[in-house]
Each structure stands twice: as structure tokens, then as C-alpha cells.
Image (tube, rainbow, N blue to C red):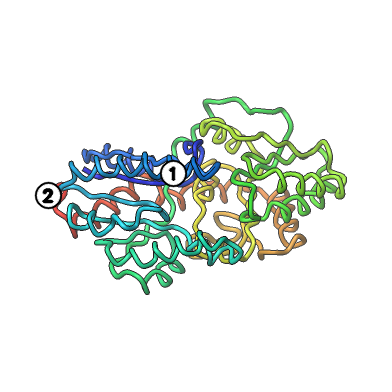
Amino acid sequence: MIIYILQVPRAYEATASYNRVRLFKEGFEQLNVQAEIRPLIIRHVNFLGKIVFLVENFFQLLKLMRRLTKKDVLIIYGETYFTALYPLFKKLTNLVIERNEYPSFEINPNKSRTSYMNSIRNLNSYKYADMFITCSTYLERYYRRYTNDIVISPLIVDVAEYNNNRFVNTPPIEEKYVAYCGYFGNNKDGIPTLLEAFSIVSGYYPELMLVLIGFGPEKDISYFHEIIQKKEIDGKVIFTGRLPHSEVSNWLSHASMLALARPNNKQAEGGVPSKVGEYLSSGVPCVLTKVGDLPLYLKDGFDCFLSKPDSVEAFAEKMVECLQSDTTQICKNALNTVQQFDYLIQTESLLKELKKRFSICR
């Protein structure tokens, strides 16, 4: 039995972290390994909400402890508020911790004192992990200071889900469009750069639309609208809001181009965004930035278009290059590249690592 625990917001089905865990669960079950997910819903509306969150989840964890054995593997995903229980988990079962970002204070130094101290507690608790999972070479080097047995598991994606949508679904709009999907907050994906680059590209391709799929803080969306008005691309940018996963894949698979202008910051350095796997699986040409581990897996002009980060002009040039090119072979190469990240292959790889260390499935 493999059990995942992760702290999640209320609408957790739309998050990249939950989608990653969901795909591993499906992969394990197809490999005849029982798996389940235990989401712990975070409530931070007020002090009382936080207390309710802690109490409810504390009792859930106690109930889980009663059934854990050394034949199980417990995978705790991300930073949590129950690190004090990690020594007990380690005694009861095989404890695996997965962390696919830097600690929050490394990404945002302006985080609150409470958040900072919780990140420190998490770092100090990683010594209890029997195995530690992360997604990039940068994070592997960082977390090596806090734990020893580290496995890199980068992207995971259901390749068929995205590729097949080109053939089984109809395009969501008639116009040709560039698409982006993700979370709009904290400039983690460089949406301002994308908007300004699109305004340049729009001068060459006035019929082209830009579709932004996702959600974020109102202040960020207001800022995007300011850029849209300043760059005079009103009426050319569509905000879809939060969408079900199946609708996201339909928008991606019918786009003329998929774009991700990630800035060269700490978050981009460490992470390997799951959307890259989805982009590559869609059969649509992708324009990305050279950040983090992406250049280890992708090659400019071969399976995608890679741009220098933090440059509106450079990203616009790559977008124009993509639109002017015959991308048939590039898209085929992208589909070949992304096969290594298919959820069954990644699950088999992770299961192999688990079997090396633990008694499950022997």
C-alpha cells in the first residue's frame, strides 16, 4: 500500500501538486500496487478556521497511524504543519517526503515569520525521511544538506490525454490563438512578459488571440489588464478562469502555439513545471524559456523553441519564429521527448526505487 498525504486548498483538484499525485496513484494501480490519496484541506480564513483545520487533520492523521505498517509507504508531499509527527511515522512505516520547490522563504523572502519558522521546521524534519523525492538537480543539491537518500522524479504527464484531444474534441473557439495555463500569482510564470511579447507579435499577426487559462489574485489580474490596455491589445486576450482539467487539455491541444515565459528566478530555477509535460504532449509547438533543468531535457529548434528569460524582445522573436516555421517535425520530436515523462514510465521508475529500499510488492 502506498499512501499520499498532501496539504491542499479547497479546490485542490485544479492544482499541479494534486494532478502529479493523482497520476502516480493511477500508475501504481495499473502496476497492481494499491494506492490512495489523503488530502488535508487547508483553512486559513481566520484564526478559528486554522484551529479547525489543525484539529480535524490531527485526528485524521491519528486514525491513519493506527493502520500503518512496515509494509506500507507513506509519502508526504510538500511543506506541512504536522512535522512533529514525522518521528512517529518513521517508526510505524516507511516514510518518504516529496518536495518539488525551494522552501517558501527562499522563493519569497517577505513571507511572514510564521511561514518562515514552519519552513525551518520542515527542513529540520527531513532527516526522518527514509527516502526523499524531488524534481530537479537544483533542488537535489539544496536538500542534500538536510537528507541523504534523494531520488529525482521530474515531470509526470498522461501523454495520451493531451494528444488525443486534438482528434476527439472540437476547438473551443474559431480564432487562432496562443495559450498559457497555470497560476497567475507571484509572477512565477512571467505572464507580464508574455503579454508584452504578444503585443509585439500581434502587430505581425493581428488575427491571433491570446488565451490565459487559470486563476490568481485579483491584484495580479488587475495588473495584467493594465498591461493589456497600455499595449492596446484589448479584445485579443481571453481569460478563461479556473477550468476542469479536461477543458484545459482541450484548449491546449487546439492552440496554434503554447507559451511559458518563466522568469529566471529562484522558483523557476528549482521547479520543473508540470505544464511543460502537458504542453509537449499536446502536439502543439511550444515556446519556453531557458530556466532551471529544462535545457537538460529540451533543445531549441528540435522539440520546442527556447528563449532567453526575462526578455520581452527575445520571447517575441521566438514566438514569431514558431509561427513562421513548419513545426511538423518539431511537434513530432516533442511527442518523442515527452514519452520519458509519461505517467506509467515515471511510476515504474519510482516503484523501482521504492522496491530497492522497502518490502512493498516483493
> Quick one: label 2, few (<14), some, or many (20+) residues within 10 Å?
few
Distance Cα–Cα, label 1 vs label 2: 41 Å
Q: Are marks 1 and 2 in contact (CB under 8 Å)?
A: no
Q: Is residue 26 above or below residue 355?
A: above
Q: Quadrant of the N terminus?
A: top left
Q: Is residue 33 left or right of residue 226?
A: left
Residue 51, labelled with which disc?
1
The numbered mark, 1 or 2, whose residue comes first in the sequence reads 1
> Quick one: label 1, few (<14), some, or many (20+) residues within 10 Å?
few
Residue in front for this viewpoint, 230 or 179: 230
Residue 233 percent location from the top left of the image: 84, 43
Q: Amino acid at mark 2?
A: Arg
> Residue at the spot x=36%, y=56% of the render?
98
Label 1, secondary structure: give it. Answer: helix
Q: Is residue 202 left or right of residue 347?
A: right
Residue 40 percent location from the top left of the image: 39, 41
> Residue at the spot x=62%, y=48% of the render?
327
Residue 146 percent location from the top left of the image: 35, 71
> Residue at the spot x=27%, y=37% of the render?
29
Q: Is residue 290 above or below residue 12?
A: below
Residue 108 percent location from the top left of the image: 58, 63
Q: Mark 2 = which residue?
A: 362
Which residue extends farthest bottom?
145
Q: Is residue 310 above or below residue 155?
A: below
> Residue at the spot x=54%, y=43% of the render?
46
Q: Nearer the viewer, mark 1 or mark 2?
A: 1
* Image quarter of residue 179: top right
Which residue extends farthest left?
362
Label 2, secondary structure: give it. Answer: loop
Q: Amino acid at mark 1?
A: Ile
